[in-house]
Amino acid sequence: MRSAMRQDGVRAQQRDQTRQALLREGRRLFSGSGYGDVALAEIVRAAGVTKGALYHHFSGKAELFRAVLEEVQQEVGRRVAAAADAHDDPWDQLTAGCQEFLTATTDPDIQRVMLVDGPAVLGWAAWRAMDEAASARHLADALTGLVDAGIIAPQPVAPLVHLLSGAMNEAALWLASSAGPGDLADTRAALGRLLQALRTG
């Protein structure tokens, strides 16, 4: 009995290691070459597994990409949350989180997977749904708290969430194609002024 349980544990560990290898190599290849230029054979070769092993975990390249995108979004979410949590004041939490989102998405690997290939591979509606699930809810919670506290003037929060989220995503896309050394600093400053305009008083 114990032997069978140990074997089950070993198999589960091997399955997890295979999945992690596929995600790791998929992310490296997708971010480096772009989804369209990466072949399935290249991914399994880099991960050191068979195509059958890949199909055990994912239905194909698109599903693997979706899992990689979810991983990237979670990583950005953790960075945003850490930046926000470094502050006690709710307003400082909002501004620090928004600024960290811009900074995080200047990472070329994140840009390629999350902002360039994400909408193209999954389709706009599916990508937006994932983006909303990953970040819009947290932004909505933060803005609702600030409205309730009187720091932002009373107003419907949903339009504000979409306006800010859209502005930050568009700025991140622009930064992905810009070459100016001061563009990130300028964009962060512009975002700061945009957010400051929401404050009452």
Image (cartoon, rainbow, N blue to C red):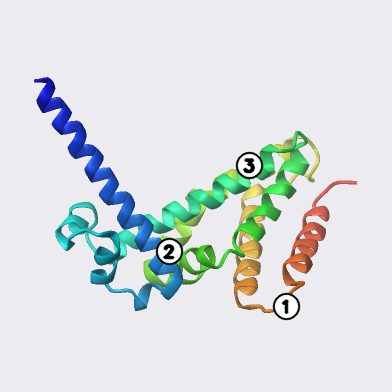
SS type, badge 3: helix
Secondary structure at badge 1 equals loop
> Residue 95: where, in percent of width, then height?
74, 49
Q: Within 10 Å of the Cα at label 2, are there few (<14), some (14-19), or many (20+) other Cα atoms? A: few
Label 2 sits on a secondary structure element that is helix
Q: Where is residue 166 in the image (x, y as percent from the top left)?
A: 61, 63
User: 71 above or below 167?
Assistant: above
Depth check, mark 3 against mark 2: the one in front is 3
Q: Residue 82 carries which label?
A: 3
Q: What residue type is labelled 1?
A: Gly
Q: Which of marks 2 and 1 is nearer the N terminus?
A: 2
Q: Compute the Cα span from label 2 to label 1.
A: 32 Å
Quadrant of the rendered image containing residue 194? bottom right
- Picture coordinates of residue 126 (x, y %)? 40, 61
Q: How far apart are marks 3 and 1 (CA)?
A: 28 Å
> Label 1: few (<14), some or many (≥20) within 10 Å?
few
Is residue 195 found left or right of 32 in the rendered image?
Answer: right
Q: Which of marks 3 and 2 is nearer the N terminus?
A: 3
Q: Where is residue 75? Give x, y as percent.
A: 51, 50
Give the number of the disc on residue 125: 2
Q: What residue type is labelled 2?
A: Ala
- Single out the residue that lies furthest toward the top: 1
Could you tell me how many numbered marks the image carries? 3
- Name the quarter where the N terminus is drawn: top left
In the picture, the disc for residue 101 is none
Give the residue at mark 1.
Answer: 180
Q: In this view, does 40 lie to the left or right of 159?
A: left
